[in-house]
Image (cartoon, grey):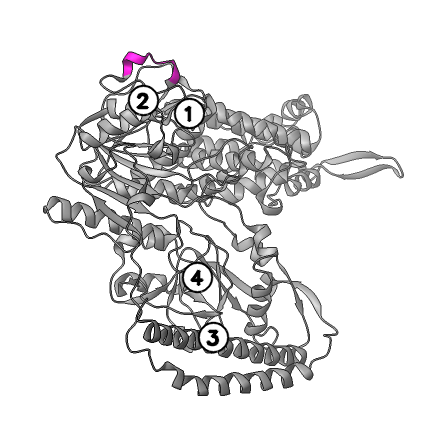
Amino acid sequence: MQRITRAEIARLAGVSRASVTQWGKRHADFPRPGDDKRFALADVLRWLESRQAVTRTRDAGTRVDRYADRVRRNLAAAAPVEPPNLQLPGDGRTAQADNLTLRLALILLRTRDPQAWAEVDRLIPPDLTAVGARWLLKQIAAAVARTARRDGVRPEVFAALQRLAPERVSQVRGIMARCAGLGAADVQAIADEYETALPSGSFLTPRAVATLLAEALIDGTAESIYDPYLRGGELLAAAAAAAPNKVSLYGRGAQPAALSLSGVTLLARGETADLRAAEQDFPPPVTHILANPPFGGDSWIDQLPDTQWRPFPAPPARSAFRWLLHCLQRLCNGGRIAIIMPPTAATSANTRESGIRRQLIEQSMVEAVIALPSGLYAGSHIATSIWIVRHPPGSDQPILFIDATHPRTPDDRPATLDEARHTDILQAWRSFLIDRDARRSHPGSERFSVAIPKTDIRTDTCSLNPAEYVRRRIESPPAGRHDTRTDLHQLYQRSFDCQLAADEATALLSEPSGARTVNIGEYCAVKTGYSYSRLPAKDRSDHGVPIVLPRHLRDGRIVADDPPYAPHHLAASLVDYEVRTGDVLCVRTGALTPPALARPADDGRLVSTNLLRLRVHDTDVLDPYFLYAYLRLVTQTKMTTFARSTATAYVAAAHIAQTKIPLPPPHQQQAIVAALRALDDEVTAARALAVEATSARDAINRRLLGGA
């Protein structure tokens, strides 16, 4: 039963608090408060039913109604109403980030302090307009700040709530109602959105990069983890998620806002951490360190004296090596570092930096250098590398170089850090460790990775650039293709037939008439693939239910060559993510390649986390092929405008659902689809002919020129 204070009765009834006090004194039947000094709302409403209220109006003079009706109207006006896209108005530069902070604060308050959440939820603002809405936000900020302080987290980040400018209390209530159903599992989605919401010049470590760092580094030996340059707590969160056991988390931040955001993000996930400002003491030595320090900017680390870095040469000011050496100093014996480094750190001609590289190589401290694709960070095309370094020095063992800057296949452009590439990197790193520990030579992977003995590292520059070491073997041409020209006749005939069919189908078309413009979401269910947490890459199998990845979407089809599999016992819980004939699959994260239309052979496959599945509600109203063709047309136009650079380009399900699509009458759709299918068949036949003709030419070249 809802209970309200005397002041809240006054606000709802539109009278002064003194009037409510007088009602209690003059009327013996006025409800009595409980021990909490609150009144039962139902009892107050019953008492007010017989009390008339006079309201003065500009046109009619006066209007008589009941106080009980006033209360009901005001309660209804404060009922939750979700604002569009869950966004309250605010400062245009920071509104998106401030709204994300509000959601994060509400999740934190509800999960960490249910009593404080209930008290805020019961509050009745002084009015229901913008004034009351801002008052309610202020109460939320105060409550969550108290909760954060209790758990040792700085509250500065909650000042962002005061920049929001809701127009009505119902909008704030709408956000609260939505967040009432969220928990720690939903924090990652909010953290992902922060990447593009932060002001220019600020960025978090993209989720794909943070996850790769953590999964490459954290193993069963992890006891304590340190991030020397906090941004939003994303590295510590990824490390905690990857650790098989409970670990102690430490962080150091130069900015109060970063310390606060990191603490809140971790706390909302259920993790506590020892986070310290730059002027505080360093945390104790740890077993593992994940770091994404700033490149080229001033920081507290530049204030340390040159003697700090012995026995290494003192790095120049603003050098990435200052961070690397600091991490080495904070490691326990046997510990490991995974740190983001700029490409220049691998090849810099600076005497002190090359000297540091030389010592790291000579002492076998560098275990791996992984060159990542460029453009992983929002609003930037910078390239980065991951260095994995150990302490104390190791024995004379090789260094693994991985070059992930190139497309995974010739069809993948540009290179991205998608799920498939993530798996490639981890497999290369783990197989290297297995071979190294078994004292076997490591073969590496064609055009991707190679293990180099430290004696083979260039002594003049001590370069650690993967591109210099990754072997680039030229594949031998496939055997048995010298007589392929005899196979071309049928392909020419097939291409000719498809051309005629396309000519006939397009000749019958006329300009569509009577087409309506509708939102895709009105006629389709748009669903994101399964969450990575429900089926991590490590739980996949070599048999079971095949999984569709972005690289499998080719030429409008699902070409699932060498797919990963979900074990049957896990796939049984993912039936909501199965593919059916007629589903349209689109890339959600990664290179925005054209979509694919599912065919009968694809039934039962699982849609991976980097894809979106569109399923038409009524195929008599919207033909799935028509939908597929339209999305293929706008992939590089409208879809690109939706993409938000996080780790890779990102398109939300809501964006697809809100995309406008022309919807001709069914008979016109059928004619259009017939023509489009004929044109697609013509393109497919032409491509097959081109491939075969090229193969025949190359085979003859090799035969005539002796393989030159």
How far apart, in angstroms, are the residues tagged by discs 2 and 4? 42 Å
Q: Closest to the observer: 269 or 32?
A: 269
How far apart, in angstroms, are the residues tagged by discs 1 and 3? 58 Å
Cβ atoms at labels 2 and 4 below 8 Å apart: no
Q: Position of residue 649 (x, y in %)?
A: 49, 49
* Quarter in which the C terminus is drawn: bottom left
Relative to 235, residue 686 above or below: below
Which residue is pictured at 37% across the width and 68% down the height?
Answer: 560
Which residue is pictured at 40% across the width and 66% down the height?
Answer: 578
Which residue type does callout 2 highlight?
A: Arg
Q: Which residue is mark 2?
A: 352
Q: Residues within 10 Å of mark 3 (few under 14, many from 20)?
A: some
Q: Residues within 10 Å of mark 1 (few under 14, many from 20)?
A: many
Which residue type does callout 4 highlight?
A: Asp
Q: Is residue 5 left or right of residue 700?
A: right
How far apart, in angstroms, are the residues tagged by discs 1 and 4? 42 Å
Which residue type does callout 3 highlight?
A: Ala
How far apart, in angstroms, are the residues tagged by discs 2 and 3? 54 Å
Relative to 222, residue 673 above or below: below
Q: Which residues are magenta?
A: 302-308
Mark number displayed over residue 259: 1
Q: Is residue 115 magenta?
A: no
Q: Position of residue 618 (x, y in %)?
A: 57, 73
Mark number displayed over residue 76: none
